[in-house]
Amino acid sequence: MQTQEIGVYTIERQSNILFIDIQGAFNDTVSEQYHQDIKIITEQMSDVPWASLISFQDNSLFTPDAEQKLVETTEYRVDNGMIAIAAVIINSAHADILQMQLQRVYQRCCIKFNFFSDIKPAQNWLDSFIN
């Protein structure tokens, strides 16, 4: 789903893992659309435990307001059955900043999380929680 020039994302459900691919920076507008899109798909998954595998490509970052909206989005997912998040950071010149932003969000939401540089180990890690 493309919401505007600054940030793009796709969301795809495969069984009980929600795969999200994010490219570019998130501002208020992008984060609000992302929140609405996540709510729709989360409602379809809330009957069983599930997890999210989120890949951040290139220089994905969040504005302060977008980071706060991500807290709301993550809390909503946790309240609706999400049990873990694997974050994969790929080709980012700002990986350290992004990791600090995500760590603040995920710790605040009391969700199990881990960071990876490749999708396959991230998926294996999530499978261990779900199974």
Image (cartoon, rainbow, N blue to C red):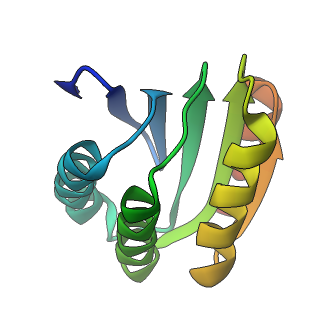
Quadrant including the N terminus = top left
Residue at point 29% right, 60% down? Answer: 42
The residue sitting at 46% across, 76% down in the picture is 78
State the quadrant of the C terminus: bottom right
| Residue 51 in view of the camera | yes
70 is higher (above) or lower (below) than 7: below
Residue 12 left/right relative to 113: left
Q: Is residue 59 above or below residue 54?
A: above
* Quarter holding residue 70: bottom left
Q: Is residue 129 left or right of residue 51?
A: right
Examine the rendered structure and indicate whether residue 123 appears above or below residue 126. Answer: above
Residue at the spot 44% in from the left edge and 42% down from the top edge: 15
When asked about the image quadrant of residue 11, the answer is top left
User: Residue 62, position in %: x, y?
Assistant: 48, 48
Report the front residue among 115 and 28.
28
Q: How many marks?
A: 0
**Image location of residue 34, percent across then percent down:** 26, 47
